Amino acid sequence: MPVPAILFPADPLNPRRPDPHFAWEARLLRELGGEHHLVDHDALLAGHAEQAVRQVPQDRAPLWYRGWMLPSARYTGFATALAARGCALLTSPAGYATAHELPGWYGVFEGATPPSTWIPTAAAMAPGPEELAAAAARLGGSGPAIVKDYVKSRKHEWHEACYIPELADLASVGRVVARFVELQGEFLTGGVVLRRYEEFERSADGTGSGSGDDSGEGSGEESSGRPDGGSDDRSGRGSGRAVEARVWWLDGEPVLVGPHPDAPHHDVEPDLTGVRPLVRMLGCRFVTTDLANRADGSGWRVVEVGDGQVSDLPHGIDATGLLASLIAA
């Protein structure tokens, strides 16, 4: 079977080189004897997938992608353009959407992640009062929550467009959601998500990952989100920041366990006992899970699930095992 190659975004200023953010991965891949090719990420986002993959050799399959986030529809166009060149991504468009967007993975991880509900939207328009009241009721109707879309939050506008102190205060829910939708604008993905706010263990020095993502006190999302609206859910309130682990899974097995990219110097040893069967049940080949420990010591929670192709690596981590596993898959 052919050895997989990896596609990286090209440097916008020098299309024959990898984007600087991913250049170190490309160098390590070469040291491991792997092969990479470049794609034009801006062209992918613009819907010009055929133009974006011009540097990929004909009949070069199979392929992984390691790069910036793509909306699911653009990823589908990406896969179609590659197929026209006789190439195949190892993560299908359906698999990408499942891991990348909360409604795709939530059903499998329900119970292991903060309770969530969502309201699909066809455009950047805030849900009405009745829809928001029904969504709040589905989360129990009281207590704190977080608002985000299927992929991103506005954690940098924490009080303004992210954190809802009390679901029973429907006027406040409406204000925060409306502001979130306004700020996301054309980048709103899928719809509006409400998630229960949970308290996670914090670092004493404040250098941990952001407190207060879509799920409560953790961070979240894949991180490689340069072109998208919103943020990666890494800010919050209170002293210190939630300490998280990011686990990289390939075919249901953890191939890299490390700190979250927002806190690359923290040592983390998450308990994967309950997570492993859920990852396998999800059925996606290459995914990440962000995990945080509850502040009351009751156990590790899944803060976020992501597609491994667009999940960022923490600075300074040894990714040898991860990349070696990908080209051996």
Image (tube, rainbow, N blue to C red):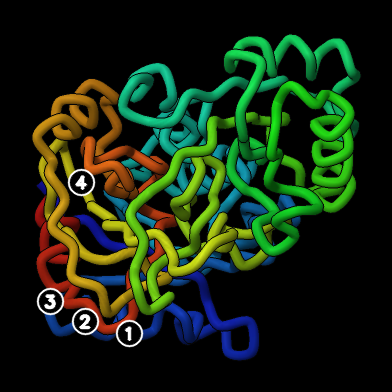
Q: Mark 1: which secondary structure?
A: helix
Q: Is residue 234 left or right of residue 240?
A: right
Q: Mark 3: which secondary structure?
A: loop
Q: Spatial distance from mark 4 to mark 1, Cα to Cα? A: 21 Å
Q: Where is 68 relative to 26, above or below?
A: above
Residue type at mark 4? Trp
Callout 3: few (<14), some (14-19), or many (20+) C-alpha neighbours within 10 Å?
Answer: few
Q: Spatial distance from mark 2 to mark 1, Cα to Cα? A: 6 Å
Residue at the location (21% across, 64% down)?
A: 258
Q: Upstream in the sequence, badge 4 or badge 2? A: 2
Viewer-nearest of discs 3 and 1: 1
Mark 4, residue position: 249
Q: Nearer the viewer, residue 32 or 170?
A: 170
- Residue 182: x %, y % from top left: 89, 46
Rendered image: mark on residue 33: 3
Q: Spatial distance from mark 4 to mark 2, Cα to Cα? A: 19 Å
Rendered image: mark on residue 24: 1
- Residue 83: x %, y % from top left: 45, 41
Rendered image: mark on residue 115: none
